[in-house]
């Protein structure tokens, strides 16, 4: 595989500009609006929250991704989610796009919108418009501006999350960039709160859409911070074709190359969201192998990283494997508790904890050590078939409670 | 309806004896074994955890409830769950029943067993046997012994949970008594961790089983503390017929009378479990009315009381209704976010918070007051049909995290 990680993020691919600015939407003295802008029209693919309550910008983007001939900009704000805002919320999306369309000189239906923050509050539309003016002035293709954009979309995130890679498509270098945010209300079911991927690849809309939909199932849809599927989950991929490669078509080695790069980006960003979950001290990974079906593997892995008791045990560095067993048991995934194995895996060692229906004679001290690492890994061997899946979450800490008991104030 | 609450608990019905004693299973200086004993053989009905990993005593009881001609005693221990213990765990159930059978002079298959505590640890069988000797000596029909039994089955519970009522069946007084425990790993899916109901009613096994299975769906299965369905959930009803009533048959007014009493007992105990959830400061009730189907109503109500973010907001007395809306949205239950209403209900007032797709102009100060009560109630009017359901949970607090990060130590 030709993939290489490079410096930079969302505006690393050719022809993309970005930036983050202070618009004063809700917070003082912090960046809270970002733009992703492409000099050329883009093919767009997106996956969106399965929540029945969809934020206005989610409805807006779903329509545009499906129906616009092309898209060219994404305007993002944090602080206010523009969800649970009824007709007024939709009107504000239209007003935002209309204004951005004039400022950026692109069609209104080429403007996508992302919002994240408190549900129910109304957007201060004048500040949004002022913000759009500033975004237009500040947008740039330098790496710092990309980083600023990734910082501007943060809410309770403690670190910004950006990434860029290149691949080689028949001698042409194609670049992919990404930025994501999300820390609480993270239990994506189609995709996570806000994730953006840009690429200068030339690729058809149908091909890109198929690739994205297949990939989120094993990346963003396999993470959870708190089991709450947000109203605003949005993952978008924009491709502007400016790399000049021969168009990537399904069933070719180039398709596989691009697919792997997109998967790497999505998996890396999804894991970063899980590891930076609200209040988290540790990333929890649960890998299920040799399950009878892919669906069983996914259900089993996800139940473990979603279990409040397992998450609290990891916070306490307590090798309480019964909670993992319990979570597997209620997951709905098929397995035989009398014929499976559970391992704790550390950065440099692995321990068999449970086998043949009962705990092994493991060292509690060693187990506690493994559970004290920054990445806590569980490996579950189901011994039934050949399917595997991995899910990511984080520990449940005092700070999660603190952050969410105080969030609005 | 003839139902009256009376003093007492599990041994209030005629012919039942109970007690709680110190057996030193895991803790020092606290009661940790209990017995429920009936002087006459009992018809038994039970519902058990849907977790694929079933504790040995659950497997034991499922077999006996289904296949024994009658049951006469339940031996319960706390501290160790006897789950994830393989063949050895089943052998220990058999040994426990065998020993109790000799001491109590009843058939081995008339002995039911309940265990709760840490998963994976092995039972100290000698202490269990010593405990059974003590239980035989101490069992009694006085109210204090019933209370002792309800205290002996507690783990992280902060209060014991017992209850007794009488009803009139064609001039004969029939009594029902109950005790339950459960505080963490509470997300029953068939029934909760340990719940016991006794009655001196004369009632057939089939009738009793049908009644119980129908009732848990709207009582124990509608509560959640942390979303973790335990490996040990067991709810048993024992009926010894000693009241001397004419046998209660389906389709009669007496059946309805008994059904209401059982429902009152189960709902009261289930709510007590939810309100005494690990670390909880407040009981959360979510009532969904006018849903299109019963299943929709249940899903919607349960999603709200299970939402970590809603639970944390209640802990913070924060009127963050967006989180309730969000939980309804991902529940899988059908509704129209643009045409429903959400109310906060206090002990003496009610506030409309959300209507027609957006928040109302409610007073934050008043809302915070309602959210500071010991019982926080949400009413959701779906405006679609005639079905309703209620679910109960508790707030998510620092203490929940503390208790579960430290549980085993």
Image (tube, coloured by chain):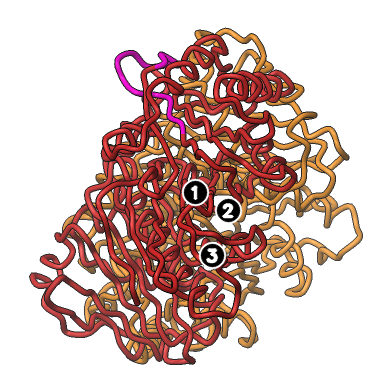
Chain colours: A orange, B red
Label at residue A366: none
Say whether residue A27 is left or right of residue B20. Answer: left
- Closer to viewer: mark 1 or mark 2: 1
Q: Return the x and y of residue B65 as percentages of the image width and height.
A: 66, 45
Q: Earlier in the sequence, mark 3 or mark 1?
A: 1
Q: Evaluate whether label 3 is on the same chain as label 2.
A: no
Q: Relative to the observer, which residue lies in front, A176 or B244?
A: B244
Mark 2: which secondary structure? Answer: strand
Any magenta on residue A338? no
Any magenta on residue B33? yes
Looking at the figure, which quarter contains the N terminus of chain B? Answer: bottom left
To which residue does mark 2 refer? A177
Q: Can residue A40 be seen?
A: yes
Question: Marks 2 and 3: in contact by CB < 8 Å?
Answer: no
Say whether residue B195 is left or right of residue B189. Answer: left
Rendered view: A191 above or below A363: below
Q: Evaluate whether label 3 is on the same chain as label 1.
A: yes
Which residues fall within the magenta stretch?
Answer: B23-35
Q: CA distance from mark 1 to mark 2?
A: 49 Å
Q: Return the x and y of residue B383 as percentages of the image width and height.
A: 42, 91
To which residue does mark 1 refer? B192
Q: CA distance from mark 3 to mark 1?
A: 11 Å
Q: CA distance from mark 3 to mark 2?
A: 49 Å
């Amino acid at each position: 595989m030709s993939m290489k990680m490079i410096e930079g993020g969302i505006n690393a691919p050719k022809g993309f500009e970005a930036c983050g600015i202070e618009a004063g939407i809700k917070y003082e003295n912090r960046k809270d609006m970002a733009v992703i802008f492409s000099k050329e029209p883009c093919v767009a693919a997106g996956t969106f929250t399965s929540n029945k309550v969809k934020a206005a910008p989610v409805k807006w983007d779903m329509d545009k991704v499906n129906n616009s001939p092309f898209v060219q900009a994404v305007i993002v704000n944090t602080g206010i989610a523009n969800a649970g805002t009824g007709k007024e919320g939709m009107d504000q999306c239209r007003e935002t796009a209309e204004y951005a369309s004039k400022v950026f000189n692109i069609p209104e239906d080429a403007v996508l919108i992302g919002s994240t923050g408190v549900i129910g509050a109304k957007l201060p539309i004048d500040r949004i418009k002022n913000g759009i003016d500033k975004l237009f002035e500040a947008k740039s293709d330098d790496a710092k501006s990309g980083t600023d954009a990734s910082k501007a979309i943060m809410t309770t995130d403690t670190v910004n999350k950006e990434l860029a890679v290149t691949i080689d498509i028949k001698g042409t270098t194609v670049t992919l960039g990404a930025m994501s945010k999300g820390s609480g209300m993270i239990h994506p079911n189609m995709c996570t709160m806000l994730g953006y991927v840009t690429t200068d690849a030339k690729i058809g809309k149908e091909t890109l859409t198929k690739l994205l939909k297949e990939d989120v199932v094993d990346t963003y849809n396999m993470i959870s911070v708190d089991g709450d599927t947000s109203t605003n989950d949005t993952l978008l991929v924009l491709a502007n074709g400016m790399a000049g490669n021969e168009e990537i078509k399904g069933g070719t080695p180039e398709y596989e190359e691009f697919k792997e790069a997109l998967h790497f980006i999505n998996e890396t960003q999804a894991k970063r969201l899980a590891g930076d979950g609200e209040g988290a001290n540790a990333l929890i990974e649960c890998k299920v192998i040799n399950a009878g079906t892919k669906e069983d593997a996914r259900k089993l892995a996800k139940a473990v990283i979603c279990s409040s008791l397992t998450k609290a045990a990891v916070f306490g560095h307590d090798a309480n494997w019964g909670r993992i067993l319990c979570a597997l048991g209620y997951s709905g995934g098929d397995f035989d508790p009398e014929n499976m194995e559970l391992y704790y895996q550390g950065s440099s060692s692995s321990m068999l904890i449970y086998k043949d229906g009962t705990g092994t004679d493991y060292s509690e001290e060693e187990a506690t050590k493994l559970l004290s690492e920054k990445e806590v890994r569980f490996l579950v061997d189901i011994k039934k078939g050949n399917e595997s899946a991995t899910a990511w979450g984080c520990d449940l800490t005092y700070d999660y409670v603190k952050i969410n008991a105080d969030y609005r104030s």
